[in-house]
Each structure stands twice: as C-alpha cells, then as structure tokens.
Image (cartoon, rainbow, N blue to C red):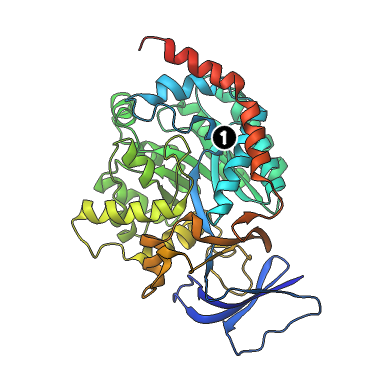
Amino acid sequence: MQTLIKNAYILTMDDEFSVYEKGYLLIENDQIKQLGHMGEEPILKEGYQEVDANNSILLPGFINLHTHLGMIPFRSLGDDIPDRLRRFLFPLEKVMTKDLVSTSSEYAMTELMLSGTTTVSDMYYFEDAVAMSCEKMKMRGFLGQTIIDMPTCDYLTAEEAVKGTRLFIEKWQNSDLVTPMIAPHATNTNSVDILKKIVMISLEMNSPIMMHVSEMDYELAKLQKLYKQTPIEFLEELGFLNCHLIMAHGILLSDEEIELLSESKGKVSVAHCIGANTKSAKGVAPIKQLIDKGVTVGLGTDGPSSGNTLDMFTQMKMMANFQKTHLKDRSAFPAKEIVALATKGGAKALGMNHKIGSLEVGKKADMMLIETNSVNMFPIFDPYSVLVYSANASNVESTWINGERVVEKKQLVEQDLSVLRSNLNNQMDEFREEVERIQRRPY
C-alpha cells in the first residue's frame, strides 16, 4: 500500500534540518519510501493513494516522553491544593480499575493523535490493558508498569509489581507498536532491594526504565537523611546510570549531578515536563546545562492531572517562554531546537531515533500535517517559529502512525470520540463517589 503526500512544506528534522518548501513524501506500508522536491518522479505502484497537502506543513509526529494516560479522570481536580499528591492522587488511585485505566488511556490517546503525537511514553497501573489499548487505537507506546512501595490498585506490594513487570515485558517485547518498560515510581518511594532488582531486570531484558527523579524537595531531603546522597549519586551507586534510564522531570539537579549524567555515555535522558513543573511551582529544570553537557532531552506533558493537557504545542511554547525568562536570554532555545526536542529528542531518549523522530527514507511513517489556512497560521516567515509560538492542536489536519492515517481532516479515522468519552464517563461512577468522600474530609 502506497500513499503519496504532495505539495507539502516538509520539515524533515534530520541532522541537517533539511527542508523541502514544496515537496512530496511517499509512504509504503509502514515506512517512508521516498521524499524530495515536487517535480522529481516518485516510483509509484498501481492503486496508490494521493494526499494533496496544499502547502501544509509536514513534520515528524511529536513524541510525548512522559505521561500517565490512565489519569484523565483526575483532570481539573484539586489543581490549586498544595499537597494534591497525598490529598487526592494516592487515595483515588486505590479505586482505579483495569477498565477505568483502559477507557481513560483510549480517551487520552485520541487527544494525543488529534494534536499530532505519534509516540507516547506512559507509566501507570494495569499497563497490560494500556498495551491492548495501544493496539486498538494504533498508537505507538512505550509503557511502564508502576512499581511503588505501597499497596496499589493492581499490586499489593512492590515485590508483586516487579514480578508482574517481568511478565509484562515477556508478553510485549516483540510487539510492533508497544515497547514494555520498567517504571519504579521515584527514588524515594521504593526500597534499595527493589531498586536493585529493577536494575537487574533492565540489564537482563534490555528494557528501558522510566522514573520520577529530582522532582520533589522532600525526595532530596529523604535521600540526604538516609544515605547522605543526592538522587543522582543514589542512582549511580545502585547501577541505574548503566541502564537505559529516562528520568522524568530532573528539576532539582546540581552541577555535580549533571556532570554525572553526562558521563553515562548517552544511556540516561531527561523528560522535560515544563507545564507540570511550573504549574506545581517546583521550578524550571536546567535544560540548557544538560544539553550543553551532552545529555539527551525530550519533552513530555506529564499526566492530564499534573499538566492538564496532553498537547505538545503547549509544552513547546511554555518551554520557550519559561527557559528564556529563567536564563534571561531571549535568544536561548531557538524555535528550531524546541521542535527538535519534541520530535527527534524524544526518539533519541527512547533509543528509537533510528526508526522515528525524523522524516527520512527507511524510517517509520509517523508524521503529522499542519494546515496553514487558519487565522493564526499567516504569515509564515519561519515555520519553526509558527509551530512553537502560533500553532495549536486545532491546526493538526492529519496524523499518521506506522504508515496508517489515524486522523484525517481533524477527525479520528477509525474511532468515535463521543463513544470513547461516553465509555470513560460510564466507568467513573465509583471514582466520583470517592472524590466526594475525600472532599468532605477535614484536611
């Protein structure tokens, strides 16, 4: 099966940032077969499909490097409460069910697809159900089963979660769309014994680890009190810096810790979640220092509870504004670099830059088409600046994942959003009852 996209303004996001202002791209099955300037002759087979981009912008799909898909029910709940994690999140997660996580994840995936995201890196509970939702929705997912030292909705102990994680990896390690991960919750929420087992599994099964690191003040205080170490020193001693580790947040990193990360030889990366980080008043992560030291960085939304939106356009704009303000440098992080972080930065962090993250022959056909007819899309002197500062999710005309068009004319191709929303709403009765109980309790 071939699809020819013609008359597109193509931003390849390859190492040279190659651009075809009036170009074409040919998809064959799940891969990019050819791309180039209009006027060149693509090799077409009988029965190919044709899409006239009409000067819309074609670029790689966004890669959301850190989120929690199952947390759609938490959106807009307790947003301005100081200790929301202990007041709402942990208690409510006890009533999460497999079906609720599944329907929430499917709803979240529609938000991702409609806003141009083609790969998501998720850590939550009942991840086997999330994996099945990825296959149903045709979403590319890196999925990690949460491991935490407390009873949860799917495992009573961290030890049980570790065993379940091993089975999860074995089941999904050969999937085309799903890559299983290991997801210890944080440096301060698991025992040393559990963390050592996680390192062993990661090295043995060649599985990535996603973990909240250097996010909370009390995380740093606890590790300093117990071990006289910073989070990165703690992880280095346990062997995490020798694993494929994706650190979510990395807000409170010292210069010495950044130096340690730079010595990991590319094994450790950081998911920068500027929306969630600043909404919760935790600070602005030292992204420029990390990049200058050679540490790979990608962008993430965090969960729909923490950042409220799964829209990566929002993250790009917020990153530009906050980082420039934080550094007091208007020239910091040109728009082109931010778009690169949202695409090939995430791909490199996931160890998938040989397959996704840029539009190049032989890579997976994961991409989006941004229409340029809306009022906010004119004029275009710099397409990268338009994407970071002007565009939003409503400008996404089409999305392709693994060569399949999952969004066309700003609508889902195979799914009905109203049905997915109704399914989720019907699963939330017990959740809403628990919210009411929590709100009645003194705090």
Q: The residue under label 1 is which amino acid type? A: Gly
Looking at the image, which residue is at 54% across and 21% down?
432
Say how many tags the image has.
Answer: 1
The answer to whether residue 200 is visible is: yes
Name, please, the residue furthest toward the right: 46
Task: State the quadrant of the N terminus.
Answer: bottom right
Identify which residue, 223 or 279, lies in the foreground. Answer: 279
Classify 305 as above or below 115.
above
Q: Indicate left or right for 85 with 195 as reference.
A: left
Q: Position of residue 145 (x, y in %)?
A: 58, 35
Q: Position of residue 319 (x, y in %)?
A: 34, 53
The answer to whether residue 267 is visible is: no
Q: Quadrant of residue 83?
A: top left
SS of the residue under disc 1: helix
Q: Quadrant of residue 159?
A: top right
Q: Quadrant of residue 129?
A: top right
Task: State the quadrant of the C terminus.
Answer: top left
Name, please, the residue furthest toward the front: 375
Looking at the image, which residue is at 28% across and 51% down?
322
Mark 1 surroundings within 10 Å by alpha-carbon count, few (fewer than 14), some (14 through 19), many (20 or more): many
Name, please, the residue furthest toward the left: 328
| Residue that label 1 marks | 70
Q: Position of residue 113 (x, y in %)?
A: 58, 52
